[in-house]
Amino acid sequence: MTVLGEFAATAATAAKTATITTAATATSANGRDRRRTELARFLKACRARVTPEDVGLPPGLRRRTPGLRREEVAQLAGVGVTWYTWLEQGRPINASDQVLLAVARALRLDGTERAHLFRLAGVSAAVSAEPDPPVVDPTMQAIVDALAPLPAAVNNTRFDVLMHNGPYRSLFGAERMRPSEGAPFNSLWCMLTAPVCCNPCLNRDEALPRMVAVLRSAYGRHVGEPAWEAHVQRLSAASGLFRELWERQEVAPPEGWLRLFRHPEVGVLQLKASYLTIPGSPECYVVVYVPIGPEDRARVERLDSLPPGGWVHTCLV
């Protein structure tokens, strides 16, 4: 290839790269513009839903539109009227997480709405959006019960057991072991603190690193939240093994893996944990333990026939 040919090829490559870069930049800018437009519409709709009486303000006279005025939102949030007006108009201004949280409070947004506000504003909502505690529809209990004889439960991302059926209760013999009085049963706490002789999980050394990695992955969305920090501190104070696993900084998603359980009346059960999401409750999921073979299936069915209350070895009494 001649020098002229090489120059032409280089110029063509540079032009192609510039075109791709320009297109990517335009796409990114278009995405930001769309988010600002959606942010403006969202704020207007939220402001229209809140009445002065809802936030302790006098109703006033001559209101042309329902809901709060812009200056009232700015007053409640402690921000300038001009700044809030520009935010609601979708102008390209910077909004800190603290200011967005103040606006969210002024507009009485719930956890889902706050998270949506932060996403539209392009701000991470991991801590500042203060998501509401997970709430599970009470009708989920009927679904969990209907899964018997398969052991099943509704867990949150801290491994708190919010609902469970009879076979699950029988499977975890250390159900009385809770992080604190009145706290929900926590399967990770049980696995960490139950004595080896009475631990319901036989392959504990394999299961615990996975569980702690799943917990740390969820913790990344809640760093700084008091409930999560207190939970990690309780586990750290109760178990040196947890501290060691936590310091590894390993993260993993919830996924099915083989679990070996033992029961003093039923024997050893090989079960695979399967996870089902719950629409509207992203911080919660259904875990179902499925038997691997026919013998495990027979033992699970026997587990379901046991009287309620689970089992507790003498060292746990």
Image (spheres, rainbow, N blue to C red):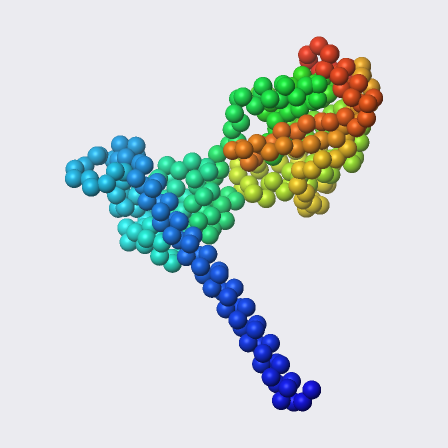
Query: Is residue 199 among the parts visible in the rendering?
Result: no
Task: Give me the residue at 36% from left, 49% from top.
Answer: 40
Q: Nearer the viewer, residue 92 or 272?
A: 272
Query: Is residue 215 among the parts visible in the rendering?
Result: yes
Q: In the rendered view, does 256 fall on the left or right side of 11?
A: right
Does 50 appear above or below 175?
Answer: below
Does 253 appear above or below 24?
Answer: above
**x%, y% of residue 235?**
66, 33
**x%, y% of residue 170?**
71, 17
Q: Nearer the viewer, residue 315 or 102?
A: 102
- Number of numbered discs: 0
Q: Quadrant of the N terminus?
A: bottom right
Name the residue at the top extreme. 307
Q: In the rendered view, does 109 fall on the left or right side of 276?
A: left
Task: Give me the residue at 46% from left, 37% from top.
Answer: 111
Task: Give me the residue at 51% from left, 43% from top.
Answer: 127
Name the residue at the bottom extreme. 3
Q: Quadrant of the C terminus?
A: top right
Task: Give me the residue at 50% from left, 68% from top.
Answer: 22
**x%, y% of residue 91?**
35, 57
**x%, y% of residue 198?**
78, 22
Q: Nearer the viewer, residue 52 or 222?
A: 52
Does 11 appear above or below 105?
Answer: below
Q: Nearer the viewer, residue 86 or 28?
A: 28
